[in-house]
Amino acid sequence: MRAKVVLGKKGITLLAVLWLFAIISGEFGWRRQAVASQSEDFKYLEGTLVHRIDKVLVVKSDDGQKINFKVGRKTVFTPKAWPKIGDRIRVKYHTRVLTHKAIGNYFIGYEVEKVEYAAGVSPKTAVPSIASQSEDFKYLEGTLVHLQKKILVVKSDDGQKINFKVGRKTVFTPKAWPKIGDRLKVKYHTRVLSHKAIGNYFIGYEVEKVEYAAGVSPKTAVLSPEIQKEKTTIPESGREHPKPSVKPPPLPRQDISQHWAVIVGVSDYHDSRIPALRYAAADAQSFYNWLTSPDGGRYPPSRIKLLVNEQATGSNIKEALFVWLKQAIEEDMVIIFFAGHGSPDSPDSPENLFLLPYDAQYDSIATTGFPMWDIETALKRFIKARKVVVIADACHAGGVGQGFDVARRANRAIKLNPISSGLQNLSMIGAGVAVISASDDRQFSQEGEKWGGGHGVFTHFLLKGLKGEADYNKDKRVSLGELIPFLSEQVRRATMNAQSPMVAGRFDPALSIGR
């Protein structure tokens, strides 16, 4: 009897071991399957590194598509040395799209799992192409007109003033720092830095190198006439020293670029079931008035397409972007302004975004709205200008159309209107495209009589800034680097942080909407 009991314990022990082994085997087997399934969740991209800022890599594939990646702390890079602009790399990334959170002027795209050099490429053989170098660095030769802490303000021969941030590592040859009026040659990175104010100046581009212009040295560098007047001294004899000869400034280069604009504003829709807006058309008309004013933008009316209310049909908007703006050449500047409703076609497809023209239909947004991807197509295929500014005030509701009203009546939770993110994504088309939208996805754009007698708060302060209130350096010219922080601060103050304008793109902060 006792032997049977012992044998029973061994049997129980054996069964327990087998059971534990089965669990462990199953666990490992499950994990092996999970690893195998992960291959479906990851993709690979081989291309050229065209930009790197903070935790964002921008890689251009061979078909010309640019993709943004977020690089986390755990990202493995082989070899350890990080690549440079122009290097061929291979990126393993998770197919899940991350939140469109801005880092600098870039929006996070996919999460990176691993980054390595492409096959046959190493740090020694990876050499930035001439094209990529020309895109990442530029040179400016001009006159130093202001020097404040870490900011250099250089005026080019065509009269344009550009602000530069000078870091500790910036190389200056010769070592002696220049004086106001000296002719300089600045090598700078085309990346736009954050618009942080230092004194009355905003950081523009990051300086790579500063040196005197060709044929100029500290001994031959001559101060401008304004500075010379301050430096003239009177000797004991009571006579002034003869003023040193001043090299006449070079004649300004003629600006051959032209400015074009398409302005759209819709307050009253043909389909009365779409909620009317009070001041969207007035916003568009007022922006047009400023652009054509001799004291404002000074645009010729012949280079502006104004579409308000019944004129702003889907076909007219498409003709303006796809056909009329084809007149603009690479050197020109294009402004696209829209005030009206923007919405997905239904709560179930937030990725399908539309601007609503005058003839949009309440129960058929998908077929009568103006697709966001048509704007992208226009920027990629039809508009050749390298300087484009998109200004939009399109988030007035949490979604427009029959699909949204049905969801509201059913007490369904409606997700945020992602129209602002859709607009911001237009900036990823390429360098030179700036997008300024009135609010973010979590907010609604406000309008009322208290803002300029009847405007949207965004357009109200946009116009005030353009008319001179944003001219921080008092040069009678409002640059984007001045306008953007002014617009952001004033709108947030006026709405008590209920509305925050959003900005995206790689653009020149010295660029001005006016001529």
Image (cartoon, rainbow, N blue to C red):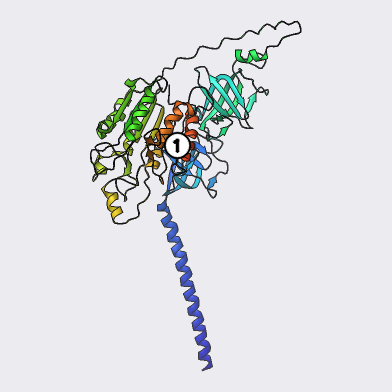
Let me know if residue 353 appears in the view. no
Asked if residue 53 can be seen in this view, the reply is yes
Image coordinates of residue 242 in percent, x first then y, are: 68, 6
Q: In this orientation, which residue lies closer to the viewer: 48 or 235?
A: 235
Position of 469 compared to 363: left or right?
right
**Residue shown at the point (54%, 20%) measured from the top left:** 155
Q: In the depicted view, which residue is nearer to us: 416 or 508? A: 416
Residue 302, located in which quarter of the rendered image? top left
Q: Position of residue 317 (x, y in %)?
A: 29, 32
**Quarter location, residue 340:** top left
Q: Residue at x 64, y 20 (%)?
A: 179
- Front one among 444 and 369: 444
Q: What type is the residue that disc 1 sits on?
A: Ala
Q: Position of residue 331 (x, y in %)?
A: 41, 22
Which residue does the image show at 44% across and 31% down from the upper left?
A: 431
Residue pointed to by mark 1: 504
Element class at badge 1: strand
Classify 347 as above or below 189: below
Q: Residue at x 40, y 35 (%)?
A: 451
Location of the C terminus by quadrant is top left
